[in-house]
Amino acid sequence: MTRKREAYQSGHTPKFMVVIDDSEECDRAIVFAARRASRTGHRLQMMAVVEQGIGDGQALFGVADVMRAEAHQEARAKLDAAADRAMALVGVEPELVVREGPLAETILAQIEEDPDVAILVLAAGTGKDGPGPLVSSLSRTAGSYPIPVAIVPGHLSDEEIEALA
């Protein structure tokens, strides 16, 4: 069962959620979501997902734990850089979240657990290989999400996004 959205109820503030990854197009989602959050008075949530299976088969001498900790550190560093970008653009300080698990399921779990997340913002890649790994993987499950999913074209410039956001 889907948890009821509370983003627009008294005492709550809606959030734009951006998934931070290594893709080139990720910056387009950051710019769009930060600008929209700034203009609408919404909050901004940035989440990095550490895929499960890191360090599996490396249990000897705690290697798996070290690998998992390093993956979480890398995710946090990506989030910090993305947060700096949002702050520099519009002065919006995002909420930062690191979660571990399969990508699509973990994003959905975060949305389910945070009733203030109102819109998931992604950006599509512009390469010949399609819209990018995140958009491609989520396109199979986005129809079951309890919130809208906004996909920003990856070819848009900051100025073009400014005009739209």
Image: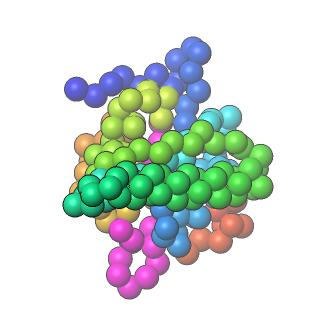
Taking depth in this image into account, of 90 and 72 the one nearest to the observer is: 72
Q: Residue at x 35, y 68 (%)?
A: 133
Task: Give the quarter of the image for residue 3.
Answer: top left
Is 55 on the left-hand or right-hand side of 38?
left
x, y percent for residue 77: 59, 57
Taking depth in this image into account, of 28 and 40 the one nearest to the observer is: 28
Q: Residue at x 31, y 65 (%)?
A: 136
Q: Residue at x 45, y 73 (%)?
A: 125
Taking depth in this image into account, of 118 and 137 the one nearest to the observer is: 137
Taking depth in this image into account, of 39 and 72 the one nearest to the observer is: 72
The quadrant of the image that shows the N terminus is top left
Is the residue 113 above or below the residue 98 in the image? above
x, y percent for residue 144: 25, 43
Residue interval drawn in magenta = 118-133
Is 93 on the left-hand or right-hand side of 79?
right
Reply yes or no: does residue 53 show up in magenta: no
Task: Give the quarter of the image for residue 57.
Answer: bottom left
Is the residue 126 above or below the residue 104 in the image? below
Q: Residue at x 47, y 45 (%)?
A: 98
